[in-house]
Each structure stands twice: as C-alpha cells, then as structure tokens.
Image (tube, helix red, strand yellow):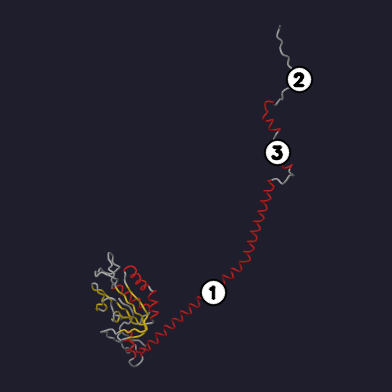
Amino acid sequence: MPQQHPVRSTDSPPPRPDASMSLLTNVMEHSLDEGYAEATARRKAEGGGMPRPLKARLGLAAGLVVAALIVTVGAAEARISAPVLAKEREELIDRVEKETSDADALERSVETLRDEVGERQRRALNAPGGDREQLVSLLAGATEVAGPGLKLVVDDGEGSDQGGGGPRETSGFSDTGRVRDRDMQRVVNGLWAAGAEAVAINGQRLTALSAIRAAGDAILVDNRPLVPPYTVLAVGDGKKLKTEFQDSADGRYLQVLRENFGIRFSVSAQDKVRLPAAPSLIVRTAEPTSASAGKGAGQGTADTGKGTS
C-alpha cells in the first residue's frame, strides 16, 4: 500500500513577524514591574494616600522653614544683646581705670609716709642730748634689750654622728643629722626678714657685723664656738614673728630639715625675752662737716642693717 504524506492543517495562524524578538516584545507590553503594579493596586484598594516622594519633599521643606526661623531668631537676639554687651564692657573698663587710679594714689601715699618716717628719724638722730647716742647703740646691738619676742630652739637629730663633711649643698655629702652653720644662717636671716628687732644665739648677740661660720663640726658666732641645742631669741611681736617665719622660705627650709634629716626644732612666742649687748662692739658716729651742716647730712653709725653671713 503506498504511503501517504500527512496533509498540513490550514487552520493554524501564521507566525508573527516579531516572533524572534519575544524579549523586547515582553518589555514593551509589560513596562511596569509586577511588584510595583501590585503595590500600586494595594494602595488604591486601601484608599490611596500621598506618595512617599511628596511626603519627603514636604518634610524637607518643613525642616528648612524651622532652620530659617531659628537663624532669624538668633540674629534678632544677637542684635538686641549687642548694646548690653557694649555697656557691660564700658563698665568693666571704667572699673579697671578706677582701681588703677586708686592703686596709684595708695602708692603715692606710701611714698609720702616713707619720706615722713625718714625725716622723723633724721630729726631724732639730730636731737640734742644723749638720745642719739642711745638710739645708735640700740640699733647697733651695743645695748641690752628686753621685750616680747620669740624663742626658737634648734637641735641635732637623735643619734647624730660626729662626722663632718661640709655644707648640705655639696655633692657626695653624707648627712649626719647635725645642724650646720648654713642652717643657722638661714634661720637668723629668716627671723630678720620676719621683723625681728634684735637676735641672739645661745646668749651671743648678733649685729650687722656678725658672722656665722663653721670650724670642723662646731658652729662659730663671731669666732665663739656654740654647742647644741641652739637657742635663738628674737625681740619683736612674738605671734607675728612666729607666723611670718613659719610661712617664709626659711621656715619651710627648717621643716624640710626635720622631715629629711631628723633635725629637731621648736618655736614659741614669748611674753618677754632679754638679749645681752654685743661684746667688744665700738659704736662710732660721724659728725657733719661745715659744708654739709646745712643739708641735714653727715650723721651715721657703723652699719646697722640686718643680715648675717
């Protein structure tokens, strides 16, 4: 039986001309993503609403309005406060100028009082009689004095060695806990600076010509050896002397000696102390010459300035 070829059906539609471009066709026909389309449909079903980009724009606009309002208010407050600050600055300048003027007036008053004190001292020294000789002797240390004052006792550390070595400032010095001449110099000068009118160590009166030195382990005052403990008596306002000395650098130096080297000391105000006259002290005064007699000059003594070397 002869084989028959199949007969094609003439009912199937002819192929599309763009059948080979199915991807582009799908993009053109479905330009909106299915997820976006679904979200849009859901918002419409819920009643709509303002799109998010529009909300963001409105929020940004509101923030800019608030920022502009803050800047405007700040500028207005700065303009209002500027006159107040200028007024306060002027008041401060006026106060500084007034205080400066008052300080200058006080300085001029101090200079006037200093000149007045100097003039009275010169008149007292030039007064007739023996008053000048007595005053000069008192200032020079040639006269015994007594009055309120201060008592300061300085002693070596407990169990101190007898070996020497030199001043504490020298390198390689092995401290023995003993009081040195340098220590006593600082103590005495600290009392002078605190306002002492007369000073003595172990009954040895100090003058402007006195010297505190060392010979081996011994401390010499005007070449006279002293032994510890060293009792320092000073004439003056006892309470003030004590406070001024303890607050001074020399008082703190003595405290450091106690803490670091075991040096012992005690200080107390006294109602009355008695200091002997300095031995072998000759007081000399100068008389004015004819050329300077009318100028109020010429009086003088051996140096009575305070200080010990």
- The first of marks 3 and 1 along the sequence is 3
Q: For the image shown, how many numbered marks are present on the structure?
A: 3
Mark 1 or 2: in front is 2
Up the image or down, 60 lies above or below 308; here it is: above
Residue extending farthest bottom = 129
Query: Which residue is pictured at 70% across the width and 9% down the height?
Result: 3
Q: Is residue 40 above or below residue 257?
A: above
Where does the N terminus fall, quadrant-wise? top right
Residue that numbered label 2 is attached to: 11
Nearest to N terminus: mark 1 or mark 2: 2
Q: Secondary structure at mark 1?
A: helix
Image disc number at residue 38: 3
Q: Which one is closest to the eye, mark 3 or mark 1?
A: 3
Amino acid on which disc 1 is placed: Arg
Q: Which mark is residue 1?
A: none
Q: Quadrant of residue 34?
A: top right
Residue at the farthest top position: 1
Task: Give yes or no for contact between labels 3 and 2 (Cβ–Cβ under 8 Å).
Answer: no
Quadrant position of residue 169: bottom left
